[in-house]
Image (cartoon, rainbow, N blue to C red):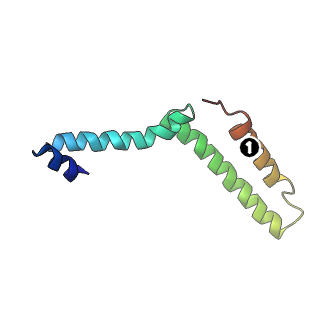
């Protein structure tokens, strides 16, 4: 794309401008989705990480339940219900 812009303008684009454009696009990658759900990048990182760790724990409980059926009999389903409640039911619509 840089080359296409340069050909259209018929003069070289200063390196600092190219770097600023690249940094702006990179910043957008980190902020677009979090903003779409009403969060900052840090808030989204914390929320998504919390979901991820909860899912890992529930997954391990399900694996253990498969080996030892009398253990963790409702842990997986409870985690799914609670995560669904947090993620879908209480979502702020924008």
Q: How packed is label 1: few (under 14 Cα within 10 Å), some, or many (20 or more)?
A: few
Where residue 59 appears, as percent x and y from the top left, is 72, 59
Where residue 14 appears, as percent x and y from the top left, is 13, 42
Looking at this rendering, what residue extends furthest in the left direction? 11
The quadrant of the rendering that contains the C terminus is: top right
* Quadrant hosting residue 23: top left
Q: Secondary structure at mark 1?
A: helix
Residue at left offset 84%, top offset 57%? 72
Where residue 62 appears, as percent x and y from the top left, is 78, 61
Residue under numbered circle 1:
84
> In the displayed structure, does residue 55 sit left or right of residue 40?
right
* Quadrant hosting residue 38: top right
> In the displayed structure, does residue 41 sit left or right of residue 70?
left
Where residue 7 appears, as percent x and y from the top left, is 15, 50
> In the displayed structure, does residue 14 sit left or right of residue 87?
left
Residue at left offset 25%, top offset 39%? 20
Residue at left offset 29%, top offset 44%? 22
Looking at this rendering, what residue extends furthest in the bottom direction? 67
Residue at left offset 74%, top offset 36%? 89
């Amino acid at each position: 794309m840089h080359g296409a812009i340069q050909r259209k303008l018929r003069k070289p684009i200063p390196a600092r401008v190219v770097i600023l454009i690249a940094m702006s696009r990179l910043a957008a990658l980190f902020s677009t989705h979090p903003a779409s759900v009403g969060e900052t990048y840090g808030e989204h990182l914390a929320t998504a990480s919390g979901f991820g760790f909860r899912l890992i724990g529930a997954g391990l409980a399900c694996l253990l339940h498969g080996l030892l059926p009398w253990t963790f009999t409702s842990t997986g389903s409870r985690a799914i219900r609670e995560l669904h409640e947090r993620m879908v039911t209480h979502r702020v619509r924008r």
